[in-house]
Amino acid sequence: MKKILLVDDEPKVLQGLQRMLRSMRHEWDTEFATSGQEALEILAKSPFDVIVTDMRMPGMDGVRLLMEVMKKYPNVVRIILSGQTDQEAFLSSSGIMHQFLSKPCDTELLKTAITRSCALQDLLKNESLKNLVLQTGSLPSLSELYSEIIKELQSPNASMEKIGQIISKDIGMATKTLQLVNSAFYGLRRRISNATEAAVILGLNSIKVLVLSYNMFSRLEHSKLPGFSPDTLWKHSMLVGAFARQIARVENYSAKMIEDAFIAGMLHDLGKLVLLTNMPDQYNKKINLIQEKGISNFDAELEIFKGTHAEVGAFLIGLWGITDTIVEALAFHHNPGKCPAKTFSLVTAVHVANVLGNETCPSEVGAGSPVDYDYIAELGLSERLSVWRESCQKMA
């Protein structure tokens, strides 16, 4: 049974939440606190899976509470449920929250957010990796692109269109921007999957605050690890995004799925970025293992990390509220046969695009992996492989 802690200084709000979640009493053990201090006292007594807190509370506010939770209990998913929050307060919480929900909150939306967070925790079995991802508030950006965005932001004639284009070319900036713009704070009626559009919605002032004040986008210097280059990872990721989009386009899918295919392809190796920046020594061991034994990158990750970049990346973007189909594409891009869906999907597009991308521009040593022909045959799409390859080769 999952343990959920809800925190709000208004007793009536807590009573309402208790009524809302009563139907989950056989699946969740739910406790309530009326202050940040009381919440910390409850957390000290037993482990919890998810904390949902108001932002504005007397004494210890929601941001301070979640900072303490992230430091002392890194394995707890952190969700803010708040109303009347100004943009500055929202942005200041962007590095410590996983998701933001607005009051009043629809019952099913709250249930879904908590249920999804609990399910995602089961995706990543290794506790050390799970804690690592749960503490990840931002992602580093490619050095050249980071410099570009700083220069543009400091320009007296800063262009949101140009800033959006820079962000759309960077894995770290694009992921964080999509997380924020799709939160309930902005109350958008549709989910945004285009990073350029997301940047425009956030606006120039918000981007400035994130970059210059809260350091949500930080510079990733060139790695000194032999066999790994941040530039190559970015080029490979952009190529896979373009290939996945082209495959979806060839199959005549909707404009939304085509754009989602690009985002999923661009983010498919996001987990490598998380592992590299947080566990560089182990990452070096992984590269050495690949070179010494000639095994695949995927198998080397299992041996060194007891988990893979696919799971890590999927877990992170799932926590950040990015749509399930993109999470699924990241999780299964190396082993699509394990995906429950048995029709053409983002998983299919990203899996094939990654194979073709590694043939043209491998992300790192040992990164190549074959097409899962059994999976493609099961979908009845074996004859489409040559069409996809030819179409993507024309782009490369």
Image (tube, rainbow, N blue to C red):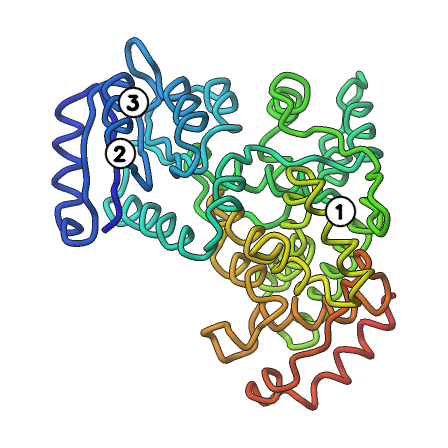
Horizontal relation, residue 253 to residue 29: left or right = right
Q: Position of residue 274 (x, y in %)?
A: 63, 43
Location of the C terminus (image quadrant) = bottom right
Q: For the residues labelled 3 and 2, say whether their Cβ atoms are less than 8 Å apart.
A: no
How much space separates mark 3 and mark 2, taking CA atoms?
A: 25 Å
* Residue sitting nearer the eye, 14 or 128: 128
Horizontal relation, residue 86 to residue 375: left or right = left
Q: Mark 3, residues whose alpha carbon is within 10 Å: few (<14), some, or many (≥20)? A: some
| Residue 378 occupies quadrant | bottom right
Q: Mark 1, residues whose alpha carbon is within 10 Å: few (<14), some, or many (≥20)? A: some
Horizontal relation, residue 396 to residue 102: left or right = right
How much space separates mark 3 and mark 1, taking CA atoms?
A: 38 Å
- Number of disc labels: 3
Which residue carries the number 3 mark?
Answer: 40
Give, as a three-letter code, the residue at label 3.
Leu
How much space separates mark 2 and mark 1, taking CA atoms?
A: 48 Å
Give, as a three-letter code, the residue at label 2.
Pro
Q: Mark 2, residues whose alpha carbon is within 10 Å: few (<14), some, or many (≥20)? A: few
Q: Position of residue 373 (x, y in %)?
A: 66, 85
Which residue carries the number 1 mark?
Answer: 284
| Residue name at image x 60 percent, y 52 percent | 305
Mark 3 residue element: helix
Q: Position of residue 177 (x, y in %)?
A: 60, 37
Tell me the number on the disc at residue 104: 2
Q: Please report whichever mark, 3 or 2, sits nearer to the chain's N-terminal start.
A: 3
Q: For the residues labelled 3 and 1, say whether their Cβ atoms are less than 8 Å apart.
A: no
